[in-house]
Amino acid sequence: MAVPIYRLPSLFALLAIFVAFSTFLASTEAYDPLDPNGNITVKWDVINWTPDGYVAVVTLYNFQQYRHIQAPGWSLQWKWAKKEVIWSMLGGQTTEQGDCSRYKGNIPHCCKRDPTVVDLLPGTPYNQQIANCCKGGVINSWVQDPVTAVSSFQLSVGAAGTSNKTVRLPKNFTLKAPGPGYTCGPAKIVKPSKFISADKRRVTQALMTWNVTCTYSQFLAQKTPTCCVSLSSFYNDTIVSCPKCSCGCQSNLNDPQSCVEPNSPHLASVVTAASSRSSKNNVAPLVQCTSHMCPIRVHWHVKINYKEYWRVKITITNFNYVMNYTNWNLVVQHPNFDNLTQIFSFNYKSINPYGTINDTAILWGVKFYNDLLMQAGPLGNVQTELLFQKDQSTFTFDKGWAFPRRIYFNGDNCVMPPPEAYPYLPNTGMGNKGFVVNAENLDYIVQIQVLDKHRPKGIVHLIVEVDGDIHPPRNSMKFCFTWQ
């Protein structure tokens, strides 16, 4: 009997397979399932030719629906194709000048082969500004405000081509916003941009335009989680806390760099020292000591059950003592968003990442009211309530259906409790029905829901809400019940 002979693939074949597989991974890493088409587009518009180069306006467009760029802002790096230099800039600056020793007299702004550009800060003199600049690199998300979702700077490039045929495009673009996570493709020449004059009576166009597209991947960012989710409901007195060590663990309770207790006598001095470090672009959080150690906690409370509707309360709490979250946003995925009836004190927009499936929404604060989430403390929380209409074919309180599938805060995926820990629906034989009652004592006014008015001795499950915090009831509380 002949013995079959198996030939091992050649080294070249193995290398080809590895390269193909690596290319596939690279193409799938920069992908967000809730914003599959989101990206940051860097547009270069050549608006003028100079004797030794050109003047260009570079604009960053944040086409991501909910992910924005926070302080200390974006930085953009590239590599010149030849030996180009930057003579001058408006609305931005390079972080290093580089070696300009070969120039006499008029010294360029930057001579580095791979310059890194950052935005200028607010308050920059007007003669150094252009439109959409000088916000410290902070860019809003496209859904929240398209007007502030752009950032621009102008640069005069020398030792470069002076026509469409002689200009060489920069390469190897790297975008940090402010950390890693973005992958930028090569520059591609596109149709020249057109500009409308202020009086809207004249249209001009760029002499040459090229685009660079950068996409985000949480896998590439390799960020430590920054938020977690806790859960509660009216039908179960269990409060499911954020998973332990969601964002880190208390390595040393005596180390003020680890966390700080809210009642610590040294709280003020520790926060002041941390704030001064933060102002120097060190954005490491100083969080309140908790079991989860997250800067942000999102609490989802299933609050009330009506005949045709049900209500949810969301509370976002900031545990970070050195960070105010400006223009924050929350992305929530739940199947009942297709029947959202009303939302209180927040803005809302459905983002429909997959067309007809309407199960994802972005929530954000009302301008000048609660669009700023203050640092940890008595004012460090924002709240809203959502009223959903029931779809009797899908609605249930059973098996955790009433809780969100996933939650993002400022574009970061929050750590959810495991499904087996969700508050369960007691076996009362009442299905999804219930009775709403009001309960009042001398200190608090609370709202509870009785699962079964026929249960012996009037036993009820309730959650007490005091100043926005969720608490189990105390045995000493005395209530007066009234059926509605």
Image: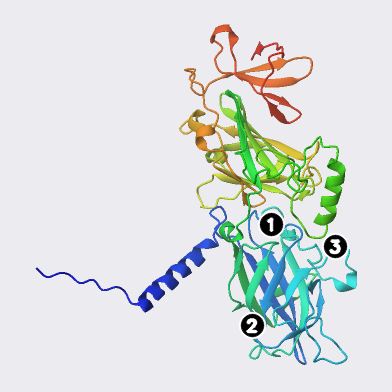
| Pointer 1 with pointer 2, Cβ within 8 A | no
Which residue type carries mark 3?
A: Pro
Are discs 2 and 3 less than 8 Å apart at CB? no
Q: Which of marks 1 and 2 is nearer the N terminus?
A: 1
Q: How far apart are marks 1 and 3 (CA)?
A: 18 Å
Q: Which mark is residue 169?
A: 2
Where is residue 290 shown, x and y percent of the image? 69, 38
Residue on which disc 1 sits: 68
Element under disc 2: loop
Relative to 277, residue 408 above or below: above
Q: Give coordinates of residue 467: x percent, y percent.
A: 76, 29
First-in-chain label (2 vs 3): 3
Q: In this view, does 377 lie to the left or right of 168?
A: right
In depth, the one of 158 and 152 nearer the eye is 158
* Alpha carbons under labels 1 and 2: distance apart: 27 Å
**Numbered label attached to residue 122:** 3
Which badge, 1 or 3, is on the more N-terminal residue? 1
User: Type of residue at label 2?
Assistant: Leu
Q: Which mark is residue 208?
A: none
